[in-house]
Image (cartoon, grey):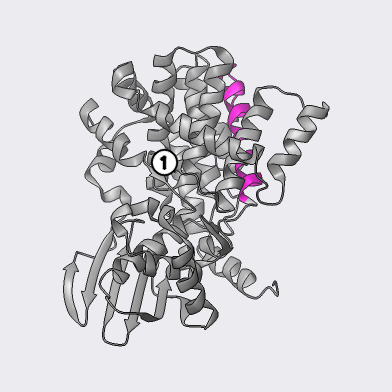
Amino acid sequence: MNKEQMLELLRKDVVPALGCTEPVCVALCAASAGKLIDDNIEVIEVFTNAGIYKNGMSAGIPNCAMVGLDWAAGLGAFLKNPEKNLELLADVNDEVLKKAEALVEAGKVSVKVDEAAKSLYVKCFLRSNSSEAICVIQNAHTNIVHLSRNGEVLLEKETATTTAGDDVLVNALLEMAIADIRKLVATATEEELEFMLDGVAMNESLAAYSETQEVGVGIAQNLRKEINAGLLANDLVNKIVLQVSSAAESRLDGCPLPTMSSSGAGTKGLVVILPVSETAKAIGASKLKTVQALAFAHLVNRYINAYVGKLSPMCSCVMCSSTAASAGITWLLGGNDEQIAYAIRNMCGTVTGMLCDGGKVGCALKVSTGSFAALMSAIHAVNNVALRVSDGICAETAEQCIKNMARIGNQGMQDTDAEILAIMTTKNVD
């Protein structure tokens, strides 16, 4: 990978998103099909892989008081604005809400798991009096591979089971060692990476939302209260925990503000960005060093996610993104390549195995835990305190640690998603 490819990957990978990515993906699929229907939509049928279904069950939807993929599909179908991509739910208004509510409440919107779909998959089938339309998204949240209206195929892409790791830019990234990625980032100028600060501003605004609005179950509100009361110190670790948990709680409760995403997910973006930016402020890092550390963290996040895959049974927002943040923080703190590898090893031996049981406000506690671990792992690493290679799944190199983490998620937990989904779908909760 050269510098131009690195910058291209960053610009493709670090983009704004509104709302939890899984409901947004379903809404985008429905919007793409809905745009093909001119008269009143009467039936919406959605089929997803288990990961999309699980992650969307309890996630809030921007500009809508309800949760769930049926509502996401209904809103998208009537919005008919796929050109807005991951920000399409910004256009939700009272008229769209009423139309979606009428279909959902009448039981005309169904969402089911397609057991055969093992990778990211959403299929929306829409029917009206005179026409029907189908849209399929596969392998990536915005990757539309099929569009048809009344049996006429309008778009058809290869649907081989590719992953993000098969992308040319990501393949080039995966050919590098973590140390090589850092060296490449160090060749970029402040001007070339200044767009990294857009994500800081966007995610800080999201984190501040709960200062004036009641969100979620009160996680951010309670943290602020205890910091102000002196029970918790107003130090770097609690600033990071508050920022990350506040942004995550707001976002997953349906906050109408966008987040800057990373590796295809908004929560991953705030978990990568906020710990690094808060650390940079705390130590008075230069603008150049700050944007380089942010870029490095985003690239490490992409690197780990390419191995783990989308919608793992494990919480990739913690396992991938918090680990990436730890690597970025270590570099900010003056760590060398060996110490950056120590930070990744420390995270490998700490956060691997945290389950993903869907997107919801409770993720705020998970990502704040991961962010605490990221800072601690980095602080230990720069002081040459590293877990032993003989410890559990830890390994000598950063790259092997990452492969071991992915192996646990991909091979070791193959049946986990099914069990999590079974628990979630059999609960009696109003």
Q: How many marks?
A: 1
**Residue under the point 47% across and 26% down:** 328
Q: Is residue 30 left or right of residue 249?
A: left
* Rendered image quadrant of residue 143: bottom left
Instruction: Please state which amino acid type lies under the numbered disc 1.
Output: Ser
**Residue under the point 50% across and 36% down:** 203
Q: Is residue 174 left or right of residue 346?
A: left
Q: Residue furthest bottom?
A: 129
Work out whether residue 403 or residue 43 is closer to the camera in this orientation and state it.
Answer: 43
Where residue 196 appears, as percent x and y from the top left, is: 39, 28
Q: Does 354 appear above or below 329?
A: below
Where residue 84 appears, as percent x and y from the top left, is: 32, 53
Circle 1 residues within 10 Å: few <14, some 14–19, many ≥20? many
**Residue under the point 40% across and 60% down:** 25
Q: Is residue 258 left or right of residue 8?
A: right
Where residue 251 appears, as percent x and y from the top left, is: 55, 48
* Rendered image quadrant of residue 180: top left
Mark 1: which secondary structure?
A: loop
Q: Does 59 appear above or below 251?
A: below
On the question of residue 422 being in view, the answer is yes
Span shown in magenta: 363-387
**Residue under the point 30% across and 79% down:** 39
The quarter of the rendered structure image containing the N terminus is top left
Q: Which residue is mark 1?
A: 262
Work out whether residue 407 or residue 277 is closer to the camera in this orientation and state it.
Answer: 277
The quarter of the rendered structure image containing the C terminus is bottom right
